[in-house]
Image: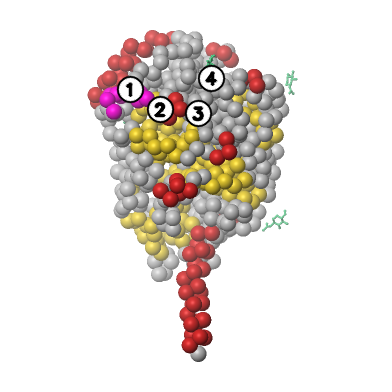
C-alpha cells in the first residue's frame, strides 16, 4: 500500500505539470508548405525590409533596371504586399551595399553605399553614396519617398559593406568595414571604425568615427559583420572567425570563443547568423546560431577563389551567458553544404534556411571560374527548417517544396506580416542581365508554412504605441483547437548579403482571460530587450499557429537623442569634404584614412 502510494505520487507530477510546458514551446503546425511566384520587385532585391503592415521596401544598386523613376532606371521600390504591386522610389545616391535600421520614432535609416555608377554607364545618381544617410518614414498612401539631403545629412566617413543595429536609446550604430568597393577587405581599404546616427559625442570623438580594434583583428574577411543588440545592453558582433561582446557605452571589447573548425562566416564566405527567440522559458537569455560559410583561406589573390569550392555544412550555437560562453560553440551539421544561407526567424519559434548555394563565394566577376558572372554555383532550391528546441540530430527538416528560381548572390528573404516568407532578388551581375544562367532576378516568391492553411487566431485593439513594461489588452478569437496562446514581438530585420540586421523575436508576457476572448499583454520590461521603435506583434497558439501580425511602436515614439555639438562637428567635417564627396567620389581609388 505504501509502495503503491509512492508510485502514484511519483507519476502524478508528470501528468499534471510536465506535458503542457513541453507542448507549448515545441508545437508547430504540420502539413505541406507551398511556394508561389507572384509579382516582381522591379529592381533587384539585394536589400529588403518590411516597413508597415502592408509595405516592404527594396534597395538595389544603380543599374539598367527596366523600372523607371523620374525618367531614369529606378534602384529602389516599395512593394504593396497584399496586391503584390510596386511603386518606384527615388533615392539620390547609389544605395549599393548599404545597411539599414529603424529609429525609435519609426523612421528607417539607410546608410552608406557606393559611388555614382560610372562603370556601368548609368550615371543617374547625383551623389556618391559612400557617406549617404537616407531616411524613409513609412506611409500607406504612396506619398513617402527616400529623403536624402547630402549637404546636411551624412555619415562621418565613407562606408561600404557596413552593418548597423538599433540601440536601446533609439539611435543606430553603424559598424565598419570599407572606405571603398573591394571584393575582399584589406588594411588599406578597411574602415575599422563605428559611428552613430544621430551622431553622439562619446569616447572623445564628438560625432566622428571611433576606432574598433576588432575590425583590425578580424581582417581580411570581415565585411558585412553581424551586429546585434543583446538584452544586457552589450552588442554581439561576429566577423570572419571571431566573435565579441561589445559595450558601446564604455567602448570595451570582450572576445568570445572563435568559430570552430576554421569556418569563416562573413563576406565573401557569407554564413547566416541569428539570435534564437528570447522567451519566458529561456529567461530571455540570448543564444546565437550560425550556419554555413566556408573553411577557405581569406588571404588568397581574388583570382584563386573558385565558384566550385564547397561551402561548409557547419552550424554552431552558443548561449551568451557565463556558462554558455565557458562551454563554447556547439557544432551540428546541415543536411548539405550551404553558403549565403538566409536564417529567417519564424513566428512559431523555428528558423527557416533559404536561398544560397552549395559552392563558391559571394560577389561577382572575381573568381577564376565564374558561372556567367557568378562567383558561386549549385543553387539550393529547397528551403529547410531548423527547430532549435528539438533534440540534436533531429532539428533539420525539408520544407518539401522546390523552387525553379536560383536565389544566388544578392538575394533576400523576410517574414512578412501575414506570416509567410517573401523571397526575392538574386543578381550576381555587374549590371542588369536578362538571360544568363543566373540572371538579374525580379520575381518574388511567397513561401507559406503549413500554419498559413490552419484556422488562425485573430486579434484587435493593438495600440499604436506601447511603452516599456506597460500592459495592454487585445480582443482575440482563438481556433477551437487552441488551449493556450503566447505573444511574440518581432523585428523582421533588414536583409542584405545574408545578414539580417536587427532580426529579433522577443516573447511578451501575457495572460489569457478565462473566456478566451481577450489577452493581457505586457510590453518588454526595458529597451535593452527590444530597442525602441517599430515591432510586429503575433499571437501564436499552443499548436504553433500565428495570427497575422500588426505593427506597433515600442517606447514613446520619440526621436532619438540629438547631440548638437556632435552634429556641428560633423557638419564642419562635412563642409571640408563636400567637393570631393559629390564630384570625385567615384574616381577616388582611396580616400582619406579614418582619423583616430
Ligand atoms: C501534402 O502533399 C502530399 C503530396 O503532394 C499530398 O498527398 C497530401 O494530400 C498533402 N497534404 C495536405 C494536408 O494537403
Ligand atoms: C586592397 O584592396 C584594394 C581594393 O580592392 C586593392 O586595389 C588593393 O590592391 C588591395 N591592397 C592590397 C595590399 O591587397
Ligand atoms: C543572351 O542574349 C544575348 C543577345 O541576344 C546573346 O548574345 C547571349 O548569348 C545570350 N546569353 C545566354 C547565356 O543565353
Ligand atoms: C526621426 O528622427 C530622425 C533623427 O532625428 C529625424 O530625422 C526624423 O525626421 C524623425 N522622424 C519622424 C517621423 O519624426
Cα distance in 3D space between marks 4 and 2:
20 Å
Residue at disc 4, CB closer than 8 Å to ligand 2:
yes
Instruction: Classify the position of ligand 1 by quadrant: top left, top right, bottom left or bottom right.
Output: bottom right
Image x and y of residue 402, in percent: 69, 44
Count the numbered circles shown.
Answer: 4
Q: Which residue is mark 3?
A: 222
Decide which of tag 2 and tag 1 comes sooner along the chain. 1
**For discs 2 and 3, the disc positioned in front in the rendered view:** 2
Query: What is the residue that sits farthest to the bottom in this orientation?
Result: 1
Tell me how far mark 2 sits from mark 1, CA to CA: 16 Å
| Residue stretch in magenta | 203-213
Give the crowd class for mark 2: few <14, some 14-19, many >=20 residues within 10 Å.
Answer: few
What is the spatial separation of the Cα atoms under label 1 and label 3, in whole angstroms? 22 Å
**Residue at which label 1 appears:** 208
- The numbered mark, 1 or 3, whose residue comes first in the sequence reads 1
Of marks 4 and 2, the one in the foreground = 2
Residue 182 image label: 4
Please name whichever residue, 10 or 183, is drawn nearer the observer in this view of the structure.
10
Residue at 51 percent of width and 86 percent of height: 3
Q: Earlier in the sequence, mark 4 or mark 2?
A: 4
Q: Nearer the viewer, mark 1 or mark 3?
A: 3
- Residue 210 sits inside the magenta stretch: yes
Binning the other alpha carbons within 10 Å of mark 3 as few (below 14), some (14 to 19) or many (20 upward) gives many
Q: Nearer the viewer, residue 8 or 142?
A: 8
Residue at horizontal 35%, vertical 29%? 196
Proximity of marks 3 and 4: CB atoms separated by less than 8 Å:
no
Q: Does residue 525 appear to the left or right of 396 in the view shown?
A: left
Inspect this view and state whether residue 365 appears: no
Which residue matches tag 2? Answer: 213
Q: Residue at x 53, y 55 (%)?
A: 389
Q: Secondary structure at mark 2?
A: helix
Task: Return the x and y of residue 569 as percentages of the image width and height.
Answer: 27, 19
Amino acid at each position: 500500500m505504501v509502495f503503491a502510494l509512492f508510485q502514484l505520487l511519483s507519476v502524478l507530477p508528470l501528468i499534471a505539470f510536465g506535458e503542457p510546458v513541453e507542448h507549448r514551446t515545441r508545437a508547430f503546425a504540420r502539413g505541406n508548405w507551398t511556394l508561389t511566384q507572384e509579382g516582381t520587385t522591379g529592381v533587384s532585391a539585394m536589400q529588403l525590409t518590411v516597413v508597415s503592415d502592408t509595405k516592404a521596401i527594396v534597395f538595389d544598386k544603380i543599374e539598367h533596371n527596366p523600372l523607371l523613376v523620374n525618367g531614369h532606371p529606378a534602384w529602389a521600390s516599395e512593394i504593396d504586399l497584399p496586391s503584390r504591386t510596386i511603386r518606384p522610389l527615388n533615392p539620390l545616391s547609389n544605395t549599393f551595399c548599404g545597411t539599414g535600421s529603424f529609429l525609435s520614432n519609426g523612421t528607417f535609416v539607410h546608410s552608406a553605399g557606393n559611388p555614382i555608377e560610372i562603370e556601368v554607364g548609368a550615371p543617374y545618381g547625383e551623389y556618391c553614396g559612400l557617406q549617404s544617410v537616407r531616411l524613409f518614414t513609412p506611409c500607406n498612401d504612396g506619398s513617402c519617398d527616400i529623403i536624402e539631403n547630402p549637404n546636411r545629412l551624412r555619415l562621418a566617413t565613407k562606408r561600404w559593406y557596413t552593418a548597423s543595429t538599433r540601440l536601446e536609446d533609439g539611435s543606430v550604430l553603424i559598424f565598419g568595414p570599407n572606405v571603398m568597393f573591394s571584393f575582399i577587405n584589406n588594411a588599406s581599404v578597411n574602415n575599422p571604425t563605428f559611428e552613430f546616427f544621430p551622431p553622439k559625442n562619446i569616447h572623445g570623438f564628438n560625432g566622428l568615427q571611433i576606432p574598433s580594434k576588432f575590425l583590425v583583428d578580424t581582417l581580411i574577411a570581415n565585411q558585412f559583420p553581424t551586429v546585434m543588440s543583446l538584452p544586457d545592453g552589450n552588442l554581439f558582433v561576429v566577423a570572419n572567425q571571431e566573435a565579441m561582446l561589445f559595450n558601446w557605452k564604455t567602448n570595451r571589447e570582450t572576445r568570445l570563443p572563435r568559430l570552430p573548425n576554421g569556418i569563416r562566416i562573413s563576406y565573401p564566405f557569407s554564413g547566416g547568423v541569428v539570435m534564437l527567440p528570447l522567451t519566458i522559458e529561456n529567461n530571455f537569455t540570448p543564444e546565437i546560431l550560425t550556419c554555413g560559410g566556408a573553411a577557405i583561406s581569406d588571404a588568397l589573390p581574388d583570382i584563386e577563389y573558385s565558384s566550385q569550392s564547397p561551402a561548409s555544412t557547419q552550424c554552431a550555437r552558443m548561449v551568451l551567458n557565463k556558462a554558455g560562453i565557458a562551454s563554447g560553440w556547439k557544432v551540428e551539421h546541415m543536411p548539405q553544404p550551404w553558403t549565403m544561407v538566409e536564417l529567417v526567424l519564424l513566428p512559431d519559434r523555428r528558423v527557416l534556411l533559404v536561398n544560397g548555394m552549395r559552392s563558391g563565394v559571394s560577389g561577382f566577376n572575381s573568381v577564376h571560374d565564374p558561372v556567367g558572372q557568378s562567383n558561386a554555383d549549385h543553387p539550393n532550391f529547397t528551403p529547410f527548417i531548423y527547430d532549435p528546441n528539438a533534440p540534436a540530430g533531429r532539428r533539420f527538416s525539408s520544407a518539401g517544396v522546390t523552387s525553379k528560381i536560383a536565389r544566388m548572390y544578392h538575394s533576400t528573404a523576410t517574414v512578412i506580416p501575414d506570416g509567410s516568407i517573401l523571397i526575392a532578388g538574386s543578381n550576381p551581375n555587374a549590371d542588369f542581365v536578362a538571360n544568363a544562367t543566373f540572371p538579374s532576378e525580379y520575381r518574388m516568391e511567397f513561401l507559406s508554412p503549413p500554419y498559413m492553411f490552419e484556422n488562425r487566431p485573430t486579434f484587435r485593439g493593438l495600440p499604436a504605441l506601447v511603452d516599456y513594461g506597460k500592459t495592454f489588452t487585445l480582443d482575440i478569437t482563438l481556433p477551437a483547437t487552441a488551449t493556450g496562446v503566447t505573444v511574440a514581438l518581432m523585428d523582421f530585420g533588414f536583409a542584405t548579403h545574408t545578414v539580417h540586421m536587427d532580426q529579433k523575436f522577443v516573447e511578451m508576457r501575457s495572460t489569457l482571460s478565462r473566456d478566451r476572448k481577450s489577452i493581457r499583454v505586457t510590453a518588454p520590461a526595458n529597451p535593452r530587450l527590444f530597442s525602441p521603435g517599430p515591432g510586429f506583434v503575433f499571437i501564436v497558439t499552443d499548436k504553433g499557429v500565428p495570427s497575422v501580425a500588426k505593427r506597433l511602436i515600442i517606447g514613446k515614439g520619440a526621436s532619438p537623442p540629438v547631440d548638437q555639438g556632435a552634429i556641428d562637428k560633423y557638419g564642419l567635417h562635412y563642409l571640408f569634404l563636400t567637393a570631393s564627396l559629390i564630384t570625385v567620389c567615384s574616381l577616388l581609388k582611396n580616400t582619406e584614412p579614418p582619423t583616430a
